[in-house]
Image (tube, grey):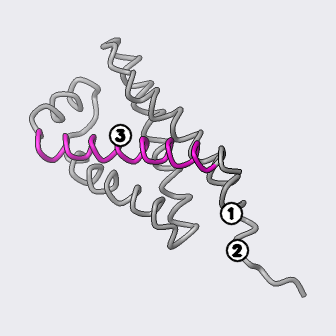
């Protein structure tokens, strides 16, 4: 059980740090982020909303106030990492390392979240009649 907690917290902290650093780059180095988005064929108007979500998602995962928001955050991380990976792959810029790391960390954190804290469905506390 202790091993599971260590794996969960290590992967989750690294995952959250990776996405928060990405959000900070979007906010504090907008011209660089804009260049990435243009080269990948994405609209630049999405940079700031994505930065906000990359900050809110770690909060949802770490606070565990709402299982629904936590699951939504994991889904957002997964979609972001998969889309970034294939976007970089399609334009052949070789910049898919961070998305690969994010994808692996998302999967590990999500799996070990269930091992350490239990299954989402079990946590709903649905009463059976």
Q: Is residue 20 placed above or below 32 in the rendered structure?
A: below
Is tag 3's residue or tag 2's residue first in the polypeptide sequence? 3
Q: Residue at x 25, y 46 (%)?
A: 23
Q: Residue at x 16, y 35 (%)?
A: 34
| Element at label 1 | loop
Q: Are marks 1 and 2 in contact (CB under 8 Å)?
A: yes
- Outermost residue, right side: 129
Q: Residues within 10 Å of mark 2 (few under 14, many from 20)?
A: few
| Element at label 3 | helix
- Which percent across, then down, holds residue 126? 77, 79
Residue under pointer 1: 120
Main SS, magenta residues: helix
Residue under pointer 2: 124
- Which percent across, then down, holds residue 63? 46, 67
Residue range highlighted in magenta: 5-29
Q: Residue at x 58, y 42 (%)?
A: 7
Is 13 within the magenta? yes
The circle on residue 109 is: none
Residue under pointer 3: 18
Q: Residues within 10 Å of mark 1 (few under 14, many from 20)?
A: some
Q: How much space separates mark 1 and mark 3, taking CA atoms?
A: 24 Å
Q: Is residue 58 placed above or below 93 in the rendered structure?
A: below
Q: How much space separates mark 3 and mark 2, taking CA atoms?
A: 29 Å
From the viewer's side, name the closer residue of 32 and 16: 16
Q: Is residue 91 placed above or below 51 in the rendered structure?
A: above
């Amino acid at each position: 059980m202790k091993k599971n907690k260590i794996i969960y917290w290590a992967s989750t902290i690294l995952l959250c740090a990776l996405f928060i650093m990405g959000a900070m780059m979007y906010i504090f180095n907008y011209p660089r982020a804009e260049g990435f988005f243009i080269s990948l064929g994405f609209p630049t108007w999405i940079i700031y909303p994505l930065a906000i979500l990359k900050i809110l998602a770690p909060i949802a995962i770490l606070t565990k106030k709402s299982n629904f928001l936590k699951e939504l955050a994991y889904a957002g991380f997964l979609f972001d990492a998969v889309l970034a990976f294939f976007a970089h792959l399609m334009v052949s810029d070789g910049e898919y390392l961070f998305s690969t790391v994010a994808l692996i960390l998302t999967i590990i954190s999500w799996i070990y979240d269930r091992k350490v804290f239990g299954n989402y469905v079990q946590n709903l506390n649905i009463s059976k009649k």
